Amino acid sequence: MSHIVSVSLPSLAVDAGYFAKLPETNITKPAISLLAYHNDFRAVLGCNATARKVWDLPWAAFHEGGLYNKKDNSLYITSNYESLTDNINVTVVSLDSDSYPLRSTQFPLLAMANGGTNYYPPGADRRQMRPLQVYCDQGDMSSRSQLLAVDANRNTSTPLLTNFLGRNFSSLNDVRQHPVTGDLWFTDTDYGHVQKFRPKPVLPKQVYRFEPATGVIQVVADGFVEPNGIEFSPDLKTVYISDTGSQQAEFDPRGPSTIYAFDVVDGKRLANRRTFAWADIGLPDGMHCDTNGNLWVSCGDGVHVWNPQGILLGKIFVGETSNNLAFAPGKIFVFSNKRMWVVENVAAQGREVCQDFGVGCH
């Protein structure tokens, strides 16, 4: 599929059923379409963008993560929680072929993996060293929730952070490494307790900054129902954090499905919290910026794309919940649990593509 479908905002403004009447959205099973809510979306995607489904599996292999490993040219994607008898798997998708073959693996000490980031340890020479991976391990009834550094090429794991000054985290959810300071910024929800594989929380649901070099740990934001996705703007002056509090034991459409923006102060603190955007369908989960500052967010019907002013530019519509996404050179992968989708020949470049893939650097 190669064309981009325009959504008429004037028509939608006076007809609440307009969106569902579009042939591309009036579907009985998941299918991918590119929907433009603003003329700028065509330039963001590029005139040659094509979209297709890559995998449709009987288990939820594509949930969070999407970390690139250069040695095997693969994306590492965490699967969704299935049961207490089986740790969450990591799905490894090779980029060597357009068929994107996959396999499953698990890493030592990693109980219930969720979001993650590529990670350079303190003092690492980024020109010489391949990055490690850091996973938000939600933990289980016997294992603490933690930030775990993984060397995927050697199958080794090292805990970086297992507590907040002696108190257990609830269910660490998503994490980003600041590309200049090396600090790890992460969110802590209580979804493990909601899903009954974690004990009752002993901390509020907050956002943290951790200095691996010194051990300093700091709360940088609170007041969330469920702080979830986190991302830096390309100029590192803004942090985006989503609140998915509308989904707890059940979905409540009156709850927050909101993305907040914060100013980054001195690379260590957050200030000037304001509403950036609200997801009209489902929850704003995993998110990534492109190099022009547009924010790509997995929501209830696919990936929504907002410009830096918080205006919705368009959607990668898949007709079901997307939990996360990943940029690769000229591509963006969409994860929706049992299915993985790809948009190819994309003009936009992910904020971290240069660092992770070593291409497109200016």
Image: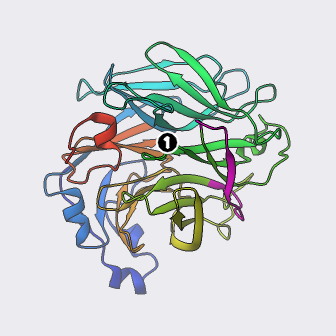
Which is nearer the eye, 231 or 311? Answer: 231
Q: Residue furthest left?
A: 48
Residue type for callout 1: Gly
Magenta segment: 212-227
Quarter of the image for residue 211 reads top right
**Residue at x 72%, y 21% (from the top left corner):** 85
93 or 30: which is nearer to us? Answer: 93
Q: Which residue is mark 1?
A: 182
Q: Give x and y (percent) for residue 161.
A: 67, 34
Please identify the quarter of the rendering in which residue 100 is found.
top left
- Residue 21 is situated, as x and y percent measured from the top left of the image, at 37, 69
Examine the rendered structure and indicate whether residue 126 appears above or below residue 321.
above
Residue nearer the viewer, 77 or 158: 158
Q: Is residue 223 magenta?
A: yes
Please count the marks in the image: 1
Q: Position of residue 179 (x, y in %)?
A: 42, 45
Q: Is residue 334 above or below residue 287?
A: above
Q: Visible in this render: residue 155?
A: yes
Is 48 displayed left or right of 84 in the figure? left
